[in-house]
Image: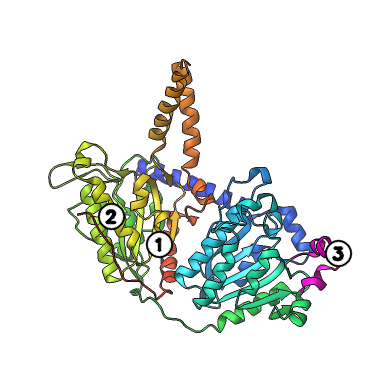
Amino acid sequence: MNLEFNRNEDVIKRAISEMKQRFAQVALGGGKKAIAKQKEKNKLTARERIDYLLDPNTPFIEIGAFAGWEMYEEQGGCPSAGTVAGVGYVSGRQCVILANDQTVKAGAWFPITGKKNLRLQEIAMENHLPVIYLVDSAGVFLPMQDEIFPDKEHFGRIFRNNARMSAMGITQIAAVMGACVAGGAYLPIMSDETLMVEGNGSIFLAGPYLVKAAIGETIDAETLGGAETHNAISGIADYKFKTEEECLDQVKRIMSKLGQTAKAGFDRSTPKAPKKKAEDLYGIIPADPTRPYDMLQIIEQITDDSVFEQFKQDYGKTILCGYARIDGWAVGIVANQRTIVKSAKGEMQMGGVIYNDSADKAARFIMNCNQKKIPLVFLQDVTGFMVGSRSEHSGIIKDGAKMVNAVANSVVPKITVIVGNSYGAGNYAMCGKAYDPRFIYAWPNAKIAVMGGEQAAKTLLQIQVSAMKAKGSEVSPEEEQKLLNDIKGRYEKQTTPYYAAARLWVDAIIDPAQTRQIISESLAAANHNPEILPFNTGVIQV
């Protein structure tokens, strides 16, 4: 019996259990009472609509389930950003699905709702995936209109993207199952086909109350913008149905007739299972994130036949680079090695730290993968770049810039999984959110911040104590310890994967045992986009 393995396994399993409990909480949307009101109107919930659409026994990667987590508490919260969304299969076609959750503030758009919807449209555009919108929204959440309405990355960008996707030849289908008000009314009309449910579906720039206030006209919602009106009079909608199920069946029929499109052509062979069980991953990651472990063990758990062909194996050992297959897909893997290693010069190097040689190796490998049209998978457990006079004099900034340049200019798809720490510039170099990974996921034990909690708290404490002393205040050791604990508590809350997922710094928090399948589905999505730009790094420091 391996006691350390068992302790690690227990910690991860508790984290997964917490993740499932929190997911169950957000999956209720606005709560059981709000769901009951939906049922009274013969309406399905957003999740039920998606479940009805999806092909049975096919994977669905939910994106942004924890978007809005512990945000907007003074407004009553915004579970899953008031939108359920993800990538799945409808009539055999992989596609993006976005469903407004009417149980959350009548489907109103908070700032995070706009950010989430834009992220899903970005996924559709980057991967050339069809989009299905399940519309049921009251429009912008008026108390926060200044944070969602006017800016470049706000509400209006949605409709700009509708137009851009149409020009790109990306199919968009909108099923209007509830309210579709004001600016939001443009979304279904800018889609290729618009379907409406009689009695519940409505589309108008201004609802009956606003019409009365603006021009004095008295009219009901159905006459103003219901399914009959827009199918028979305005010609805005294309189909009408008595039930949501009939409406969704038509969406399936439309999807089933989509023609095949060109693919990127990334290499895929017959998949081979890894030699070990996926659940064995649970015991590898240490319960203490500062402890070393062998990243090779994680790589072998997710690659076909547990094969990993290392590139420059004896050079730059704190980053592992190499070729493998994941569920048949050929990939290049860039991963932080967490064991303490020894260079050929006899120097000890700390795991998780990027040194000059490892940055140099990773940059070259990333360029190789771009040359060969091989997608990249980044496995992050990085504490940053090496600091100190020795590294600075050796040009660590120059070598780090080389790696960042290669990542930033990479044209093949990049999939990032944060399996542990993700600190500082290491987050950037290992393809964090700012470097446009096609998809980015985090394990439930992940930590994402500019630096570790202990170092950050002590740095902030020094600044705060110095400011207090400058004002003539004396700080006792007890007061200093209390300040340190308060600072550390606040800071560590901001490093959790839930804090990151709430703000869409990661697309999803995933069960480590599902990593292989989720990477495979992400690569399948990426393969739909045949357009790969020429690879050009510009000026590189050498």
| Crowd rating for badge 3 (residues with CA inside 10 Å; few <14, some 14–19, many 20+) | few
Q: Is residue 354 above or below residue 241?
A: above
Q: Earlier in the sequence, mark 2 or mark 3?
A: 3
Q: Residue at x 77, y 67 (%)?
A: 42
Report the disc number at residue 216: 3
Q: Earlier in the sequence, mark 1 or mark 3?
A: 3
Identify the residue under disc 1.
Answer: 516
The CA span between labels 1 and 3 is 60 Å
In percent of width and height, residue 194 lies at 66, 76
- Nearest the viewer among 218 and 425 is 218
In percent of width and height, residue 421 lies at 38, 45
Report helix, strand or loop for mark 3: loop
- Residue type indicated by callout 2: Met
Q: Residue at x 64, y 44 (%)?
A: 73
* 58 lies left or right of 307: right
In which quarter of the view is residue 513 placed? bottom left
Quadrant position of the C terminus in the picture:
bottom left
